[in-house]
Image (cartoon, helix red, strand yellow):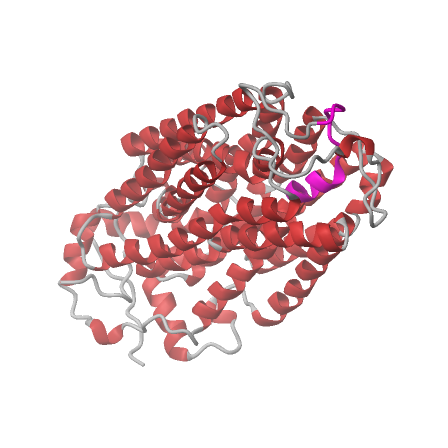
């Protein structure tokens, strides 16, 4: 028998007793309002999906554009040269180091690998600063303003990238850090909004689908960036991405409300279904937070550590994969953009699919929330680690390297239904601020990983050895994250996330919040 949608599963943190109590409720399947393509919450998911596609387009545009912006750091003609630790060029020799301008007049800059890594990591210096404040304010005031404003601000700053690059490295670093500052509020704001919009048994698919926009955005932006660089010059990349972000923001502010109760076009049936399903956990939290219990929460630290470990490999590839494709495998700019994007197509598909599968498992009571989150996290971190380590040993076999990278990132998408939505399981009311906390720690690899890549690959005469170290370190870190969450993760609502009336209900036994109205 399935756990009926429309019932609150937040009244008690003991999943099995809670499920049994809900099944004994007189409410039945007729009280549920299925997730339809025309429902407001489904439309919200689609708009968020497109928004995070834009967000990641704004984030990764520099990764491919950097290949076109930078002179080669090796002044020797590299034609068909090869050695035991270098791959031969396939095709005509290209010596970019002596060409300070592209044919379209766009400038090139003499940035070495360390400087490139420094600039790739600049975004994350700003990104980590606004995670917690963004989640806290979005949880109290609503996420609409913060998500829309974060995208709009980042898009506007992106338009200034060519000017900043012309002014010098410090200016470009500062601009990218400011872009990260603006974008840092977006994911916490998303989680705060879904805490008020997503019925418990639809959380996996709604949140996974929304967040999958990031992989889709990377998949579209990387080859599109390569194409634009090749045809219009690299400055056009930043103008196009900035314009797309500004346009999306207009639709966001016109169509979205913070919660079902304030939405002008939602049906009474859907509004009551959502609010009845979520219950009291859908209320905004106050200005005060249970900070000490949060800091002492083992499940929260399991999310933090696991997310940091997963993000190490993710951000390594996101910021540096085009450089690997260029400096090691020697793909041209258009091939580079497409092949760098291919892993994110798989990641997008697996993210969406994992959310649907996770909700189906929960609806059919095959496994508890805790078990589902652990299985999807283990799959999404451990298997990608194995394929990532294998990339370090394929040498110059280009298509084998691309295949393993694609499998690694694709399987990593399954963690979208695991650790990456676990905040809303353990503390729905504080989901936004918790995501801000976990994403703050999770952003540290975004700062450190590109710098580490620059350190490992600083010897241009031994690129294979340097990149082998990059992939092995990433694999070890990812596997460690899988182990930590498997041992210490949880899908139960924590006691510190309950208010007094909810704690009393927990003591008296599982309860069911107000049912939804039958449509």
| Image coordinates for residue 241, horizontal then vertical, percent | 69, 55
Q: Is residue 301 left or right of residue 511?
A: right
Q: Is residue 325 left or right of residue 228?
A: left
Q: Quadrant of residue 329?
A: top right
Q: Is residue 449 among the parts visible in the rendering? A: yes
Magenta highlight range? 62-77
- What residue sits 25% from the left and 50% below the top? 12
- What residue sits 40% from the left and 25% below the top? 476
Give the position of the C terminus as an image quadrant.
Answer: bottom left
Task: Note whether 248 is above or below 487 in the view shown.
Answer: below
Of residues 495 and 189, the one nearer the viewer is 189
| Image coordinates for residue 261, horizontal then vertical, percent | 47, 70
- What residue sits 51% from the left and 33% below the top? 441
How many numbered circles does the render carry?
Answer: 0
Task: Note whether 101 is above or below 58 in the view shown.
Answer: above
- Residue 250 colored in magenta in the image: no
Q: Is residue 12 left or right of residue 435?
A: left
| Image coordinates for residue 221, horizontal then vertical, percent | 60, 53
Task: Note whether 144 is above or below 289 in the view shown.
Answer: below
Q: Quadrant of residue 363?
A: bottom left
- What residue sits 68% from the left and 30% below the top? 79
Give the position of the N terminus as an image quadrant.
Answer: bottom left
Q: Is residue 139 among the parts visible in the rendering? A: no
Of residues 198 and 481, the one nearer the viewer is 481
Q: Is residue 484 left or right of residue 174?
A: left
Task: Note whether 60 is above or below 194 in the view shown.
Answer: above
Furthest residue toward bottom? 519
């Amino acid at each position: 028998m399935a756990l009926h949608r429309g019932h609150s599963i937040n009244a008690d943190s003991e999943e099995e007793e809670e499920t049994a109590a809900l099944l004994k409720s007189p409410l039945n399947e007729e009280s549920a309002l299925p997730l339809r393509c025309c429902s407001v919450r489904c439309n919200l998911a689609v708009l968020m999906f497109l928004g995070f596609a834009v967000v990641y387009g704004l984030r990764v545009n520099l990764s491919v554009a950097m290949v076109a912006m930078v002179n080669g750091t090796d002044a020797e003609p590299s034609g068909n040269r090869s050695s035991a630790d270098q791959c031969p060029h396939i095709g005509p020799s290209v010596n970019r180091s002596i060409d300070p301008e592209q044919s379209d007049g766009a400038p090139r800059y003499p940035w070495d690998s360390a400087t490139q890594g420094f600039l790739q990591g600049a975004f994350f210096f700003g990104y980590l600063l606004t995670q917690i404040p963004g989640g806290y304010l979005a949880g109290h005031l609503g996420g609409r303003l913060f998500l829309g404003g974060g995208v709009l601000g980042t898009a506007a700053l992106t338009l200034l990238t060519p000017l900043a690059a012309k002014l010098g490295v410090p200016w470009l670093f500062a601009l990218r850090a400011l872009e990260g500052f603006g974008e840092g509020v977006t994911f916490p704001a998303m989680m705060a909004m879904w805490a008020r919009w997503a019925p418990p048994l639809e959380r996996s698919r709604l949140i996974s689908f929304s967040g999958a926009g990031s992989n889709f955005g990377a998949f579209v932006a990387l080859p599109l960036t390569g194409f634009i660089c090749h045809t219009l010059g690299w400055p056009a990349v930043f103008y196009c991405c900035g314009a797309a972000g500004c346009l999306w923001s207009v639709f966001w502010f016109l169509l979205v409300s913070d919660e079902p109760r304030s939405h002008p076009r939602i049906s009474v049936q859907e509004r009551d279904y959502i609010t009845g399903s979520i219950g009291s956990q859908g209320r905004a939290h106050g200005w005060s937070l249970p900070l000490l219990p949060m800091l002492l929460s083992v499940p929260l630290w399991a999310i933090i550590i696991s997310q940091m470990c997963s993000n190490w490999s993710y951000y390594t590839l996101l910021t540096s994969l085009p450089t690997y494709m260029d400096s090691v495998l020697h793909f041209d700019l258009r091939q580079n953009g497409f092949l760098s994007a291919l892993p994110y197509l798989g990641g997008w598909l697996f993210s969406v699919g994992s959310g649907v599968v996770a909700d189906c498992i929960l609806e059919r009571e095959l496994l508890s929330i805790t078990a589902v989150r652990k299985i999807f996290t283990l799959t999404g971190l451990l298997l990608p680690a194995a394929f990532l380590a294998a990339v370090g040993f394929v040498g110059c076999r280009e298509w084998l390297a691309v295949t393993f990278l694609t499998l690694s990132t694709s399987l990593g998408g399954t963690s979208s239904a695991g650790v990456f939505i676990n905040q809303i399981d353990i503390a729905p009311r504080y989901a936004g601020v918790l995501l801000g906390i976990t994403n703050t720690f999770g952003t540290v690899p975004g700062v450190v990983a590109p710098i580490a890549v620059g350190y490992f690959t600083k010897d241009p005469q031994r690129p294979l050895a340097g990149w082998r170290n990059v992939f092995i370190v990433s694999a070890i870190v990812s596997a460690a994250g899988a182990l930590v969450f498997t041992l210490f993760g949880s899908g139960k609502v924590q006691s510190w996330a309950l208010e007094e009336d909810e704690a009393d209900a927990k003591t008296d036994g599982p309860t069911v919040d107000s049912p939804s109205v039958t449509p």
